[in-house]
Image (cartoon, helix red, strand yellow):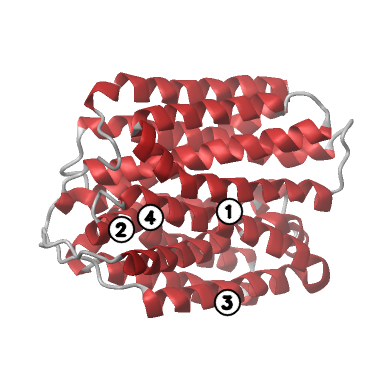
Amino acid sequence: MVLIQDSPVDTRRVSAAVAAAGVSSFALLYAPQPVLPQLASAFRLAPGSASLAIGVATGSLAVAVLPLAGLAGLVGRRRVILWSVVVSAVVGLLLPLAPSFPVLLAMRAVQGVAIAGFAGVAAAYLADRLGTARLAGAVGAMIAGNSVGGMLGRLGAGFAAERLGWQGALLVVAGVCVVCALFTVLTLPPAAAVEPHAGTAPVRGWRLGMVAPFAVGALAMGAFVALYNAAGFRLAAPPLSLTPAAASLVFLSYAMGTASSAAAGRMAGRVGRSTALVTALIVTAAGSVLTIPTALPLIAVGFAVLTAGFFAAHAIANAWVTAEAPAHARGGAAGGYTLCYYLGSGAGGTAGSVVYGHAGWTWLIVLTSAWLLLAALAVLVSRNGATRVGG
């Protein structure tokens, strides 16, 4: 492989293009979440059935990640990223036209597969383009874009739905995402030329040193999704008794994730990725403990802290995987991390919701804190074989 050496200006261009793709992808992925009650009313569904609008998309994303990572090694990672953002945005524009809920679910499945092209390939593209020295910072910028997209998709759809209905809300989000997608198409430069490996399995080239970041992706994401899945129920229940609109403001905590993920690369470069990752996981657990009391200001601070810690951990773990993998296996390794990440989201989010429903918020915090500490233990065990992200 011949690495393309970018100037600082080019590096900023690459980071901005990938961040815009992240905004588009994750705004589209999570936009239906705040309008699930409207979907349930429109299609006469129970809440559990309506939630499939999220579950089908994230499930198809997880299934498609490794095949698309393998495809990207053959046809080029930039090409897969561009098709990903364009197809997912176009499907977003068509979602409001769905005549029935099964059709909407089919469209969401297609959209999830499209988003997998970006989610599973982007970190490997950055490694090819920038090399490992500047990788952590660029991955941090990408994940900052992901967190902005997740927040804006939820908030934008939630506030627009009151006046425009669920169709108008999804259309507004898709319109913004089309602009982001066009920016990516126009500004994303080619990656370094990598020798295609036809017939190479996506898992080939994975190393033992990747176990720790894979564990972080699964366990930390499971804890994070479980907490946010249950947050709306807890905030609406006595003694807090917030309205749905007020409860949805919890997603403003994602702004802390934007800042922390962008700074995570610098932190890892200074203290080493293992130390930085364990610190981020402990911060996430500490923030979740702050939410146990029923004082609303303390709950708000707790969600801000745990969100900042989670996105920092996610950024460091993601960069770790792509830095550890051989050049020809980066796409498969990044896809493997994304697979663990979204499997953790589905399994952990579901398990956490069950625990909350049966035992309450405090026991949910006990469960998720145990997952976070287990992830930190995995990092400490692999510490001897770890290297600095930037070194």
Check disc 1: other Cα within 10 Å, few if <14, some if 14-19, many if 20+: some
Residue 376 locus on image (x, y percent): 43, 24
Residue 220 locus on image (x, y percent): 49, 33
Element type at mark 4: helix
Q: CA distance from mark 3 to mark 1?
A: 17 Å
Q: Nearer the viewer, residue 234 or 253?
A: 253
* Circles 2, 4 touching at the beta carbon (< 8 Å): yes
Q: Which mark is residue 126?
A: 2
| Residue drawn 63% across the image and 35% down it | 305
Earlier-in-chain disc, 4 versus 3: 3
Earlier-in-chain disc, 3 versus 2: 3
Earlier-in-chain disc, 1 versus 4: 1
Q: Is residue 356 shown left or right of residue 294?
A: left
Earlier-in-chain disc, 1 versus 2: 1
| Residue drawn 10% across the image and 62% down it | 195
Q: CA distance from mark 1 to mark 2?
A: 28 Å
Check disc 2: other Cα within 10 Å, few if <14, some if 14-19, many if 20+: many
- Identify the residue under disc 3: 93
Residue 14 locus on image (x, y percent): 36, 66
- Position of residue 376 relative to residue 241, above or below, is above
- Position of residue 351 relative to residue 258, above or below, is above
Q: Nearer the viewer, mark 3 or mark 2?
A: 2
- Position of residue 221 relative to residue 281, above or below, is below
Check disc 3: other Cα within 10 Å, few if <14, some if 14-19, many if 20+: many
* Circles 3, 2 touching at the beta carbon (< 8 Å): no
Q: Nearer the viewer, mark 1 or mark 4?
A: 4
Say what amino acid the circle numbered 4 marks: Ala
Element type at mark 1: helix
Say what amino acid the circle numbered 2 marks: Leu
